């Protein structure tokens, strides 16, 4: 259906008294009376984007009109326009357990690995070293930053997360998180796992951390999806069809409605190319904004990556003047961060230094992590002498 929406302030009988909305926008009205769809559709094709069509008022009309229609396919993807998607994949980052001494309920939300790698996909694919428990000094350890809920859990304490069901031979898989540091809900934990009752102290059959979390963990549930604790979110409904690299603590919701048919339509019928970037959604997606101004809100870092091939595809689109439509805010943040990193290289880093970034990265030197700060764009704009002095992306040097 296509509908025309109007609104009025007041509790009196509406009658024909539309148009007295007190200057409220449609978004403000929907924020007061609308609700986000709670359970997702069982099939992706049942979902769609809501498209707002604004009609400018004619000279002899007192007001304009706004209509909302459902968009089943990306009709805004015009000829000569490319797309960019985020191929990050959500993992079961929420772990529910108990304090090892008191039995108090405790909960972990894994945010980012510290060791054996800062790349979540790599860390999740790693297992434990073979050897006695606890691991001897010098062994690779699984250390993660996380949010920790459980007031009595302090440094040195352990949170034990057990599987609900045992294996055929009566063993129970358990993960133990030992708290190395904690400040409020922010914590750093060391993770180890084994089968309780196992006669083999060398681990649990070569399981990786990702395999253990798949058995013990849960997908963090968005607050607007109303379900009972026993109603688990399925892996299929909580991933985009192009999800590839594990590392996000929440689903990339903007791409959940895309199907293989939709993507094929974009590529085959419209001749568009689709570039892939990876930005892992971090704990900031659950962080409330309670500051009085944007300046007082601290953004949490998120890890992103892009291959040289995909970066070259984005460069070609820019050089040829083809618009790039990012699917979702994570993709937009990734592309925007790439631009600001390039600006930083051109304005602040000597050419020789810029050419050595790749070599230092391979050696794990100072440039192994390319960081774009929360206020980087504003700072670099000042360095450039204002927005008009910022370099364009087209024609940038390699």
Image: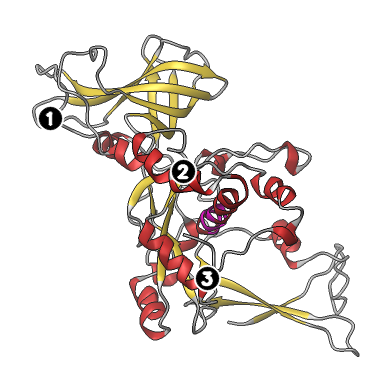
Visible residue check, residue 42: yes
The structure residue drawn at horizontal position 54% and vertical position 39%, both measured from the top left corner, is: 301
Q: Dot 1 lies on which element?
A: loop
Name the quarter where the N terminus is drawn: bottom right
User: Mark 3 or 2, which is nearer the eye?
Assistant: 3
207 or 161, nearer to the observer: 207
Check disc 1 and report the residue beneath it: 205
Residue 365: image location, x then y, percent: 41, 33
Residue 151: image location, x then y, percent: 53, 17
Give the mark nearest the N terminus, 3 or 2: 2
Horizontal side of 168 relative to 149 (left or right) equals: left
Residue 122: image location, x then y, percent: 30, 39
User: Mark 3 or 1, which is nearer the eye?
Assistant: 3
- CB-based contact (under 8 Å), mark 3 and mark 2: no
Mark carried by residue 303:
2
- In three-dimensional space, the C-alpha distance between marks 2 and 1, rounded to whole angstroms, equals 31 Å
Q: Is residue 337 magenta?
A: yes
Q: Is residue 229 above or below residue 203?
A: below
User: Mark 2 or 1, which is nearer the eye?
Assistant: 2
Give the mark nearest the N terminus, 2 or 1: 1
Magenta: main secondary structure: helix
Horizontal side of 261 relative to 127 (left or right) equals: right
Check disc 3 and report the residue beneath it: 318
Span of residues in magenta: 332-338
Q: Residues within 10 Å of mark 2 (few under 14, many from 20)?
A: some
The structure residue drawn at horizontal position 25% and vertical position 39%, both measured from the top left corner, is: 125
Q: Is residue 85 magenta?
A: no
């Amino acid at each position: 259906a296509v509908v025309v929406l109007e609104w009025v302030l007041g509790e009196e009988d509406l009658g024909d008294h539309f148009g007295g909305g007190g200057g409220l926008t449609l978004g403000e009205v929907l924020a007061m009376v609308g609700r986000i769809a709670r359970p997702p559709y069982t099939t992706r094709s049942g979902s769609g984007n809501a498209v707002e069509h604004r009609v400018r008022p004619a000279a002899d009309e007192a007001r304009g009109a706004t209509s909302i229609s459902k968009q089943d396919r990306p009709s805004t993807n015009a000829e000569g326009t490319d797309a960019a998607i985020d191929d990050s994949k959500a993992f079961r980052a929420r772990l529910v357990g108990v304090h090892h001494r008191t039995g108090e309920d405790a909960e972990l939300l894994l945010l980012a690995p510290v060791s054996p790698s800062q790349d979540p996909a790599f860390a999740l694919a790693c297992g434990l070293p073979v050897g006695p428990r606890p691991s001897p000094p010098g062994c690779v350890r699984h250390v993660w930053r996380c949010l920790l809920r459980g007031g009595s859990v302090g440094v040195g304490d352990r949170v034990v997360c057990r599987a609900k069901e045992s294996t055929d031979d009566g063993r129970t898989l358990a993960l133990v998180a030992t708290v190395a540091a904690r400040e409020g809900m922010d914590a750093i934990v060391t993770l180890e796992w084994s089968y309780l009752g196992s006669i083999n102290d060398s681990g649990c059959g070569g399981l990786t951390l990702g395999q253990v979390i798949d058995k013990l963990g849960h997908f963090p549930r968005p607050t607007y999806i109303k379900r009972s604790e026993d109603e688990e979110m399925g892996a299929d409904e909580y991933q985009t069809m192009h999800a590839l690299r594990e590392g996000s603590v929440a689903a990339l919701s903007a791409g959940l409605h895309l199907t293989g048919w939709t993507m094929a339509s974009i590529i085959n019928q419209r001749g568009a190319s689709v570039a892939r970037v990876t930005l892992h959604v971090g704990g900031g997606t659950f962080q409330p904004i309670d500051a009085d101004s944007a300046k007082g809100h601290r953004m949490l870092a998120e890890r992103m990556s892009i291959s040289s091939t995909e970066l070259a595809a984005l460069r070609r689109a820019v050089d040829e003047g083809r618009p790039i439509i990012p699917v979702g805010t994570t993709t937009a943040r990734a592309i925007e961060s790439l631009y600001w990193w390039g600006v930083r290289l051109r304005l602040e880093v000597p050419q020789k230094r810029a050419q050595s970034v790749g070599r230092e990265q391979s050696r794990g030197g100072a440039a192994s992590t390319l960081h774009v700060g929360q206020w980087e764009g504003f700072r670099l704009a000042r360095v450039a002498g204002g927005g008009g002095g910022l370099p364009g992306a087209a024609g940038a040097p390699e």
